[in-house]
Image (cartoon, rainbow, N blue to C red):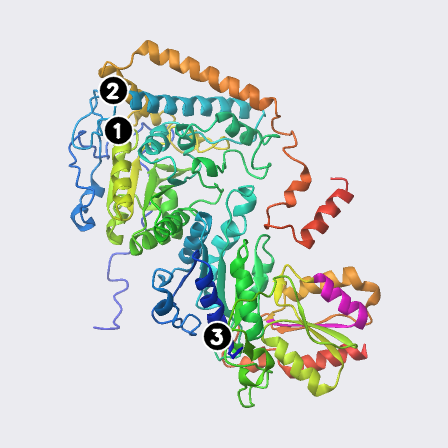
Amino acid sequence: MPGHSTRGLQAPLQLHIPEPSARPGEAPDFSGLVILPAGTVARPDVHAPAAALRELPFQLIRVLDDDGHAVGDWNPHLPAETLRAGLRAMMLTRALDERMVRLQRQGKTSFYIKSSGEEAIGVAQAFALQRDDMCFPSYRQQGLLIARDWPIVDLICQIFNNRKDRLKGRQLPILYSCREAGFYSLSGNVGTRFPHAVGWAMASAYSGDTRIAAAWIGDGTSAEGDFHYALTFASVYRAPVILNVVNNQWAISTFQGIAGGDEATFASRAVGYGLPGLRVDGNDFLAVYAATRWAAERARSNGGATLIELYTYRAAAHSTSDDPSKYRPQDEAAHWPLGDPVERLKQHLIGLGAWSEERHAALAETLDEEVRAAVREAESHGTLGTPPADPETMFDDVFEHVPWHLREQRDEMKAEGL
Amino acid sequence: MTAMNMVQALNSAMDVMLERDPTVLIFGEDVGYFGGVFRCTAGLQQKHGKRRVFDAPIAEGGIVAAAIGMGAYGLRPVVEIQFADYILPAFDQLVSEASRLRYRSAGEFWAPITVRAPCGGGIHGGQTHSQSPEAIFTHISGLKTVMPSNPYDAKGLLIAAIEDNDPVVFLEPKRLYNGPFDGHHDRPLQSWSAHPAGEVPDDYYRIELGQAAIVRPGAQVTVLTYGTMVHVCLATVDACGIDAEIIDLRTLFPLDIDTITASLRKTGRCVIAHEASRASGLGAELAAQLQQRCFYSLEAPIERVTGWDTPYPHAFEWQYFPGPGRVERALKRVMEA
């Protein structure tokens, strides 16, 4: 009967709060992950209609198998030289990350964020894009800059907020901006730049340009409205953009289920927007490269946007301010079933006869020295506590021209002896 | 010169800029084929094509975010938020992104965007179609906030806003779209055709941002106001015979501090009138600036005539709207103090 209450007659409702598979003190448990063998996902034509691709976001694109062989349709058949360059960029990213965390512990900078275990994501994608395609990264894609051969000494100067910090001491360490390298200004706000990439891509299409855009957010940030804005605009205007969700399982202490990842894959969000969604083994350099290349070709031929979920694991703490042992098993990273991106590409290259353990060890040493040399050079321009610029510059760039009230406040600051 | 109401003047500004600058494009909810719910973009898509003027999803945050991305590319987007009341989903984009992009990137990227939004009350719009949110933008470093009070200014200010390399929030008092409004809601509607500022040049011209206008010179008291309240204050002053100097701020931030302080040093008395609610409103900033700069010229406490600190109530519009009676009583209090 309409309006008739059945309260008290039915079983009570239950509120569901998702929980990760293991917490500190428990054994890591990835038994719930369904990981099909490498090479089993077919590679569709880049011009295939999105409606024909609706199963893709529930699969996992993998090229490198457990023995390091490249298998299946998605194998991009890259020359060994390119693979070695990719390996080098990932290793340099890792060497920089390791050194910067040590320097943070020594008080030479206030903060750092590593990309450990996720190096294939920025690096392989930079290789798959063109140098002048515009990247709208989050704070864990430093590999993009390294793959684009941006001098690491410039990054370290920003991290130190020293006299050579191009951002004049205004930004938290690692919140880079690098227009020349096609690297958009980072911000501590998560997600806000994701729809900027779509606007930039729309502008490129509006202008008859040939450049495309790419953007990155984390699994956690996919819950923000900005994610929905970006996918809606990308779909409506067929923007030439690649929208990446880096699912590294953890948003600080919050596992991906709290962002809705337990109910459906993040890649499958694409289906409702009529976009292709690719779900990719993020620790597989070749798969990441191939998927990005597919999406780039599609975008560049006016086929519109692709959503890519890069399935990976955040092997390090969220940042130097975080302690993951408080919320996940300490050895969880070591149990990640998709391994480590550097090790896997190394194994593949060795299998090809294009690399060796000796060359690998020698390269690691060379890169470590390269980072140390860059640190020495950056330190010569100062570290944390060295005034990065004249304090008066803090009033510049709020507007194109400094207005009267900021000129007044600048004078006021000087008069205060600050 | 052509007789235009404010809608036509804004339309003309966008038409001129679409013609002059291929990087200018316009989008927003209902602005394309239909020409906007207030008709401000009527005919622009037909004339300039849907590549330049198009409809956007109902996603204010997405509209402003896309505009910022386009601005970073090198375009000069002009977006419409259908009502200023609905700008809040875009607030994060304006505060965290548009206003800081130039600063945090040390000049590598910037957002030369114009965000137009009809604001203000007096149209029986209730609490979701009547708000005046200017002070939440004037508080943000890196944003410019503009509000015209007549068709002539609207066109010149909008062109200057579009050409500005910083993000501009351009608030349009919708009660003034079709005619000036003196606050006497029970009297016949007025038309811009009888108003000198309803004569608008057809071609390009700018009214520089940051410049106030003395719309009525006077000696006894300074009235600082903007938007619809300019006309309420003019009518009130004419009716009550007080020799007030009325200043239309036009750009609410950065303020034209020199014009304002020069007037107050001359008159020694000040009434600030705005439709927006009072607490932490623009009047508070104006009063603070003036007491610091002109304290020894002041003959009376500065008065604020504002909307009340409540949501805008539908059935009590004329108790809420700061009408001529309240302006007149404030002027008298200041004159008698």
Instruction: Classify residue B11 as left or right of residue B54.
Output: right
Tag 1 and tag 2, C-beta contact below 8 Å: yes
Task: Label 3: state its secondary structure.
Answer: helix
Instruction: Specify whether disc 1 shares its chain with disc 3.
Output: no
Residue A348: assigned label: 2
Viewer-side label of 2, 3: 3
Between A134 and A278, the one lying in front of the other is A134
Q: Chain of mark 1?
A: A
Q: Residues within 10 Å of mark 1 (few under 14, many from 20)?
A: many
Callout 2: residue from which chain? Answer: A
- Chain to which the residue tagged by mark 3 belongs: B
Instruction: Find numbered disc 1 in the image and state the secondary structure of the residue it sits on.
Output: helix
**Residue type highlighted by circle 1:** Leu
Q: Which mark is residue A286?
A: 1
Circle 3 sits on which residue?
B7
Q: Circle 2: is it few (<14), some (14-19), or many (20+) Cα within 10 Å? A: many
Amino acid beneath label 3: Val
x and y percentages locating residue B16 in the rendered image: 47, 66
Over which residues does the magenta segment extend? B257-275
Picture layout, residue A381 above or below residue A187: above
Mark 2 and mark 3: span between their CA atoms? 66 Å
Q: Quadrant of the C terminus of chain A?
A: top right
Q: Residue at x 75, y 83 (%)?
A: B242
Which comes sooner in the sequence, label 1 or label 2?
1
What secondary structure is found at the residue carrying circle 2?
helix
Is residue B30 something one can see in this rendering?
Answer: no
| Residue at horizontal 63 percent and vertical 33 percent from the top | A388
Residue A214 rendering spot, x and y as whole percentages: 36, 42
Nearest to the observer: residue A49 or residue B306: A49
